[in-house]
Image (spheres, rainbow, N blue to C red):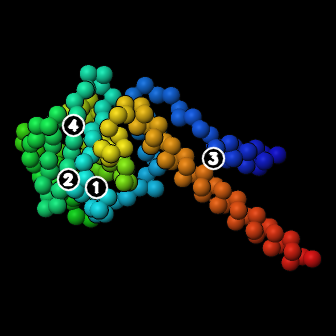
Amino acid sequence: MAEFKEIQDILGNAFKSDLPEYTSMNEYLDWLIPQIRPLGEDLYEEKHYVGRPWLEFQDNDFFHDTVLHFFNEGGEYLYSVNGNVSIGHWRVLDGTNKVLIDNKERSAEAELYDLAYMDRNFFVLKKHGGAQHGRGSSYFVMANEGISRRLEWRDLMELMYSQYRSNNQFYFVLSVGVLLVIALIILLSTR
């Protein structure tokens, strides 16, 4: 009977549609990142983030600026706040999922981040050591400008969760299909 309950829980979770309620982006990401990280890319796969406009998100009610980040080839880093651009440098530390961002106009020191999650739509870094990075959060959250321009941070969390849920449902359905084929083969071979 306990096994049936476990199967029932797995089925229920695979099709569960509601994102848990949290009050901050940090809380959402602390819950969500461990679940989606295996689905993401690594920093050495530059085609996923280099040369693309990344729109920054914060859960601060007073944050209303349009902040874009560009990680260009050759280590050029562009940081645009409402169209005012500053130039810096970025580089991935060899053999790691850590990126060093140096922008003297934003910070007197370079900042080291660990990759939390990245795919074609989301680029989430976490300040190394869990420290806050000047935005009041340990996470540095960016999304592809094309899909996120009119979203609020909670909408972005829902979009990220929706992507995870869709992927989770696909693998669940695929697994059930494989199990059904195996069961059918066993059933037909015993006849």
Looking at marks 3 and 1 on the same chain, the residue that comes earlier in the sequence is marked by 3
Rounded to the nearest angstrom, the CA distance separating label 4 from label 1 is 16 Å
Q: Secondary structure at mark 3?
A: helix
- Name the residue that disc number 3 marks: 14
Rounded to the nearest angstrom, the CA distance separating label 4 from label 3 is 35 Å
Q: Is residue 85 left or right of residue 183?
A: left
Rounded to the nearest angstrom, the CA distance separating label 3 from label 1 is 30 Å
- Name the residue that disc number 4 marks: 67
Looking at marks 2 and 3 on the same chain, the residue that comes earlier in the sequence is marked by 3
* Marks 2,1: beta carbons within 8 A: yes
**Residue type, numbered disc 2:** Phe
**Residue type, numbered disc 4:** Val
**Residue type, numbered disc 3:** Ala
* Marks 4,2: beta carbons within 8 A: no
Rounded to the nearest angstrom, the CA distance separating label 2 from label 3 is 36 Å
Q: Position of residue 23 (x, y in %)?
A: 43, 25
Q: Nearer the viewer, mark 3 or mark 1?
A: 1
Residue at 66% in and 61% down: 175
* Marks 3,1: beta carbons within 8 A: no
- Where the C terminus falls, by quadrant? bottom right
